[in-house]
Image (spheres, rainbow, N blue to C red):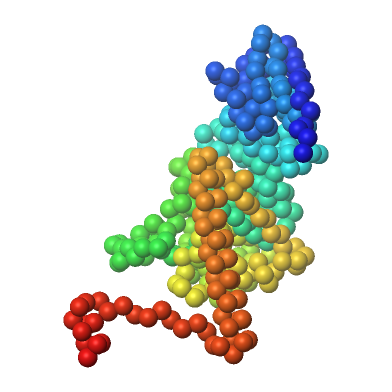
């Protein structure tokens, strides 16, 4: 196969402040750009030089032109933003970076604007604005709960809803914690801590505690939702993969008038007892295609945590895929054997655990 034609291009940046923001300290952002796009990138004077295939160079030029507009408008760029922006531009040629970065959902307590970081996140935000029931499904670190929380706080502050209800199943992640001390609130608090952390990142702690005290923000285990009708509310069910089928059905039928619900979870991290099916997986199968319900799927590409998280997710997914393939092959062999009338293959012979046991077998 013939190699792609290699070309070079020069991007002139006359504004020194914009040039510094685009290349980053020690040309860090330029190196990220080169790795993400697959081009050689360098700077000389006020010119950024690119070299690579025509398609890759064109993508890099497009990014630099749109990133320069963002920088001049006051939007700072960091290394993770560059990589995710390149991915978004590759996924959707019609997308502009201004659409991605300037759609501010909320300004956090730290005065940091909360915006979409990937194309999947942008579609997720649009789905929350347009639907009453939204499912965000994907691996950890993709911003499912965080963005839902930001949308909920925005809706409350804009008086679109009267209260926020945050809930999640009280299921331990693979280890038994035993009996926890304290009253009921203190017992369930460890399970709800991640929701409080996200809430306190959205708004000042004192303001958040005041809203909780007045009942405008409620954080509770999923079991506490039974028997309620949630009107004028923005409801978030987090870690929904650990909800049973009965719990998911109960939660989804709580939704009242002028309310919106966002259900988030990762179907690959189910902590339910062996043999119990995740209510999230079942809801995805049953409710896909129903008008008014949106399903947003995230992948490892959308991870906005440490770059290693994406690699870890890929490694585990590869392991799980290989295990499923081996299980499928074993089932096929058993089915073939039964079709031939031979029955399932015999189990391997047991090995005696001691010389005495082996002498007993010989006798």
- How many labels were placed on the picture? 0
Q: Residue at x 78, y 35 (%)?
A: 2
Relative image position of residue 183 (x, y in whole percent): 33, 64
Residue at the far right: name it: 94
Residue 53 located left or right of residue 300? right
> Residue at the spot x=79%, y=28% of the render?
5
Residue closest to the eye, 14 or 35: 35
Q: Position of residue 64 (x, y in %)?
A: 72, 24
Residue lying at 55% horizontally and 61% vertically, measured from the top left: 322
The image quadrant that residue 259 belongs to is: bottom right
In the rendered image, residue 286, in percent from the top left (x then y), is placed at: 68, 72
Determine the residue positioned at 20% across, 78% down.
Answer: 355
Quadrant of the snapshot with the N terminus: top right
Residue 248 position, x and y percent, is 58, 70
In the picture provided, is 323 more to the left or to the right than 352?
A: right
Name the residue nearer the viewer: 288 or 330.
Answer: 330
Name the foreground residue: 37 vs 127.
37
Q: 236 above or below 114?
A: below
The answer, for residue 213, to whether it is visible in the render is yes
Placement of 25 over or under 83, stated as above or below: above
Quadrant in the rendering for residue 74: top right
Question: Which quadrant, please, contains the C terminus?
Answer: bottom left
């Amino acid at each position: 196969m013939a190699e792609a034609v290699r070309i070079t291009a020069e991007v002139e940046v006359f504004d020194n402040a914009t040039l510094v923001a685009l290349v980053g300290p020690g040309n860090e952002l330029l190196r990220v750009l080169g790795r993400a796009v697959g081009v050689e990138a360098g700077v000389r004077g006020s010119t950024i030089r690119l070299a690579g295939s025509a398609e890759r160079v064109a993508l890099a030029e497009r990014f630099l032109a749109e990133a320069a507009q963002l920088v001049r408008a006051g939007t700072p760029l960091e290394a993770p933003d560059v990589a995710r922006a390149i991915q978004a531009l590759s996924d959707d040629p019609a997308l502009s970076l201004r659409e991605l970065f300037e759609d501010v959902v909320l300004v956090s307590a730290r005065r940091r604007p909360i915006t979409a970081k990937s194309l999947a996140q942008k579609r997720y935000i649009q789905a929350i604005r347009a639907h009453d029931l939204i499912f965000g499904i994907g691996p950890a670190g993709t911003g499912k709960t965080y963005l839902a929380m930001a949308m909920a706080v925005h809706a409350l502050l804009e008086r679109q809803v009267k209260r926020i209800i945050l809930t999640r199943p009280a299921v331990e992640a693979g280890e038994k914690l035993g009996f926890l001390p304290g009253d009921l609130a203190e017992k369930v608090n460890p399970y709800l801590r991640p929701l409080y952390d996200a809430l306190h990142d959205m708004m000042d702690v004192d303001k958040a505690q005041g809203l909780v005290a007045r009942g405008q923000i409620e954080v509770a285990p999923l079991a506490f939702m039974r028997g309620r009708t949630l009107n004028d509310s923005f409801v978030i069910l987090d870690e929904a993969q650990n909800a049973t089928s009965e719990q998911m059905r109960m939660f989804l039928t709580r939704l009242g008038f002028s309310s919106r619900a966002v259900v988030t979870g990762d179907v690959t991290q189910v902590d339910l007892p062996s043999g119990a099916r995740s209510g999230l997986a079942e809801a995805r199968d049953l409710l896909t295609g129903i008008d008014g319900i949106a399903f947003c799927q995230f992948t490892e590409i959308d991870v906005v945590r440490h770059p290693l998280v994406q690699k870890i997710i890929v490694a585990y997914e590869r392991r799980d895929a290989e295990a499923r393939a081996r299980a499928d092959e074993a089932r096929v062999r058993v089915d073939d054997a039964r079709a031939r009338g031979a029955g399932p293959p015999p189990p391997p012979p047991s090995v005696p655990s001691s010389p005495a046991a082996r002498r007993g077998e010989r006798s």
